[in-house]
Image (spheres, grey):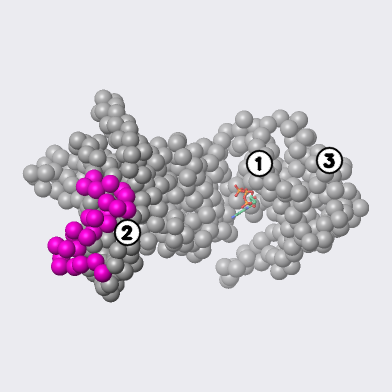
Amino acid sequence: MVAGHDDKGTVLNNRIFQVISKVAAEENRKAYVIGGFVRDTLLGKKCKDIDVVVLGNGPDFARRVAAELKIKKGITVYENFGTAMIRWRNYEIEFVGARKESYQPHSRKPLVEEGSLKDDQLRRDFTINAMAFSLNPEDFGLLIDPFNGIQDLHDRIIRTPTNPDITFSDDPLRMMRAIRFATQLNFDIHPDTLAGIKKNCQRIEIVSMERVTDELNKIIAANTPSIGFYLLSETGLLSIIFPELEALKGVENIEGHSHKDNFRHTLEVLDNVARRSDNIWLRWSALLHDIAKPITKRYTPQTGWTFHGHEFVGQKMVPSIFKRFRLPLHDKMRYVQKLVGLHLRPIVLAKEEVTDSAVRRLLFDAGNDIEDLMLLCEADITSKNQKLREIYLENFKLVRQKLKEIEEKDRIRNFQPPIDGNEIVRIFNIPPSKLVGILKNAIKDAILDGIIPNEYDAAYEFLIRKAEEMGLKPTVRT
Ligand code: CTP
């Protein structure tokens, strides 16, 4: 898995590194590429973000590199942080002066001062992210790896370079980063590092929600997101950042009757969706589809365990969860709400005889998201009974077939009733009122139930008849 020397050589042939090396020699300074770029190169992956650490002042060095590359506008300097960023071709190159941090006995605020390369490496998050390649002419390309990150890369281990308490108190977000890297790379977290997360988990509360959500989304976007969620739960982070999800955990047993563990089930559904779609919002829908099961759970000896209405209660819980995670509150949230609210509908269809009317209603309610809804429902089949799974999937095939037929015939997906509220106001010369809504819905229902075709004239005739029953007569014919 770890790439050979040749790959590294090719990557470092990039002009940017040659220029940095030249500037380092001319200025008699030391420069190193460090962090994610080194990790990804050794993993044989491409990386467009390049972190360069230099001894001494970072922005001064960056200005010299920018001048050499004839870059005028593509440089941003953050003097306060001692960093500067250059955009060159498709690359973003960040320059920072090597730093060391020391803690004063009476203050939680660290003292940041200039340091050596090793000081800088020591205060990075993980051994696999603390490796550097020299960019200096005398040993260009040399791997500088004081914490044996290369071994951890081979052994697939996430481990802090120093005492985890120090690494995590330096930046508690790193606890989530550890889990995110373990999920993305399918690595294990070293037992000491894992113990450090468990011990420090409460400190996640001081991190801004945006940063937490960023990591959470990266976990959700990984190939097997469940890895991250099991780790979040095991370390205690999940109950702090996402208590609703943690609440899905557990199996209750009354009189020998138990329900399934909805946490495991949800994560299985999430992984199933992740196998078939990269759509992060569809993945969020999978994560939230059963979120209201704990609060709707009931047991009666007659019916056993039920979760009546969990899809609607779940739909209502989505906004507060989206708000807390600072997720987009408009289209994306509505999409997730829709899928959570509808996730049982295709199952009901698959269980009963599929009537045209029920299919039309589902098409109308799901609109263009019908494909995603079907995918979610298929992913929701997690029964361990192979026979049962096959039967369900077969039923869904029938539902899909029926959806296709009805859509071709009736064009319901983007259906707008042929007569809208404004027109009803005009036809009967009535003010906008509840009555208009009733008539409008009656037309919609008649079309969805197949009483009339989805056409203007038929809708008009129906409207007139319906209105007459209510004592209304048209004043104009449109
Ligand atoms: N880093 C750190 N602590 C953090 C964030 C970053 O020590 N909380 C260091 C690590 O050495 C990391 C480097 O800064 O490799 C760059 O950080 P970043 O760009 O956030 O992450 P990458 O490792 O490049 O990975 P990704 O792009 O996947 O986030």
Amino acid at dot 3: Asp
Query: What's the distance in space between the residues labelled 3 and 1, CA to CA?
Result: 19 Å
The residue range painted magenta reads: 449-475
What residue is at 41 percent from the left and 39 percent from the top?
Answer: 273
Query: What's the distance in space between the residues labelled 2 and 3, CA to CA?
Result: 77 Å
Q: In the rendered view of the protein, which quadrant contains the C terminus?
A: bottom left
Q: In the rendered view of the protein, which quadrant contains the N terminus?
A: top right
Q: Which mark is residue 39?
A: 1
What residue is at 82 percent from the left and 57 percent from the top?
Answer: 71
Q: Say whether residue 427 is visible.
A: yes
Say which residue label 3 marks. 139
Instruction: Residue 233: give x, y in percent of width and height.
Output: 39, 48
The kind of secondary structure element at disc 3 is helix
Amino acid at dot 1: Arg
Instruction: Residue 53: give x, y in percent of width and height.
Output: 75, 53
Is 53 located above or below residue 223 in the figure? below
Instruction: Residue 199: give x, y in percent of width and height.
Output: 45, 54
